[in-house]
Amino acid sequence: MRPATLVRLALAGSRTDTARVVLTALSALLATLAGLAALTVLAIEKPPGDAWAQSEQYRNALLREPGLRGGTAFALLMLMIPVLALAGQCARLGAPARDRRLAAIRLAGATPGQVTRLAVLETGVAALFGTLVGLGVYLVGREVLNRPDAQGRLALPTDVLPSPAAVAAVVLGLPVVAALATALMLRTVTMSPLGVSRKAARERGPRPWAGLLIGLGLASFVAVRPVMYSLDGNDEVLGWLVPLLFVVGGLTAMIGVVIGTGWISYHCGRLLRRHARRPAALLAAGRLMADPWAGSRTFAALLAAVIFGGGAAAQRAYFAAQDQLDREQSQLVGAEGVTDSFYLSTMDLVDAAVAVAILIAAGGLIVALVEGIVARRRAYAALVATGVPRATLSRSVAWQALAPAVPAILLALTVGTLLGRGLVAKVSTGVSSAEICEATAALCDDPATRGQYIRIVYTPAIERAVAVPLEQLAWLGAGALAAVLVTVGVGLLFLRASTALDELRMT
């Protein structure tokens, strides 16, 4: 089969296939922008001078201070996780219709390898188109946003560009990763002229091995501070070991929570089947036990955003506690409690990034729920034909989404908070002293009389535990649950059309 024929067949299909390609390209575009933004931050050159020299051409301290750029780039890279999860959900849109089309191509004489390459090429071409458009948006935005203020300082690093190799790694690497992921998902699929079949799912429920991954991730974060103390002065080792612990710990805990959602879904189904008495809950129990990994696929991006938000809430609580302690120490020596709000202001930006990630994840939830309803429309139509009310099916879909979502969100909040507290569980200040002049301003300003009125005030060392940010965690959990509820509401709009009796005659 010629390459041109492969591309034409890969991009052929119905409106659903077109929507899948467009959404995959859009996801790749967003991931490209996040990746290029992170690389741009890392491309800022350190100014000449000592280790504390700052890049004064930027207005934001996150860009001026070299020590803060790594965290900023890491936060931007974390935004890619919900975007890539959205791409994975979009790749499943209209899967039954695509399977029938691939089976028809097999019937026309294509080999199994050629049909697999068609499916892989569709995702790869759509992702490549998205990354190229994303590169164009990045370059245009760089010119549009390059507006120095009156002092010549920039709001964004529009004066630097990542290296060509780094840009090529993002623009070409994302489509390659998308294509490889598609090939991996198709490993259990058999495409024959008679149709597309998949290997039977496991009969037993998921095992709780995800707890080991969560424990490993928490241990990595807890080990960061001891490693920094034990290797103090060995900057070469700390330069790669500490970031490695952060990345490995965060990703391991995140994967553990996502995989653990499959275990949660299965056992929620068991509990519903044992204790529920209403048809809607019993239908949801059957679906949860039949496909417990659907929850892991559906809620992956949302749970990743919630974990990141929980860690950010713990960090905000630490900065707020340290700020309060500094104010109290200043008041003990009679000074005005002035503090630097830079870190708390930075956490506002982090919270905004979490909100954006939850919105992106909500889009992935909508795609996943609608795809699940459309894929099972014949089963739903058969239930309606046998007398099951559509209201019962609606409640069943809601049960199926909410039953695993609530404990999974609580688990993600807990893990995210523990990751943050593994780094900073206490605030402390050392012993300090300050001179206080107890006289008029004239006497204190005169060197001849100042010494007579000087009193030295010593402040003791204080160590205080950081409070758990219950209020912020409650708001974060409520926002994530609201995203699930909105998703269920949007998905139910498609349920009536998917339960029409005409669906029984569709092929």
Image: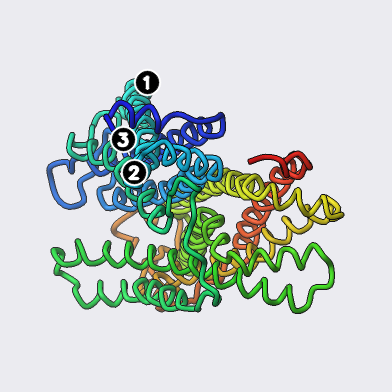
Which quadrant of the figure has residue 161? top left
Question: Where is mark 3, residue-wise?
Answer: 58
In the rendered image, the vertical position of residue 178 relative to residue 314, given as above or below: above
Question: Residue 339, how many percent across, how many down?
Answer: 45, 55
Q: Earlier in the sequence, mark 1 or mark 2?
A: 2
Give the answer, above or below, for where 340 lies relative to 167: below
Query: Up-down: is 257 above or below 107?
Result: below
Residue in the picture at 32% in, 49% down:
180
Secondary structure beneath label 2? loop
Which of the two residues, 349 or 220, is positioned nearer the viewer here? 220
Q: Residue 442's spot in the image, x, y percent?
A: 40, 52
Query: What SS does tag 1 mark?
Result: helix
- Sooner in the amino-acid sequence: mark 2 or mark 3: 3
Q: Type of residue at label 1?
A: Val
* Category of crowding for the residue at label 2, using alpha-carbon neighbours closer than 10 angstroms: few (below 14), some (14–19), many (at least 20): some
The residue under label 2 is 111
Marks 3 & 1, CB-CB < 8 Å contact? no
User: Percent from the top left, x then y, of residue 11?
Assistant: 42, 30
Whether residue 336 can be seen here? no
Rounded to the nearest angstrom, the CA distance separating label 3 from label 1 is 16 Å
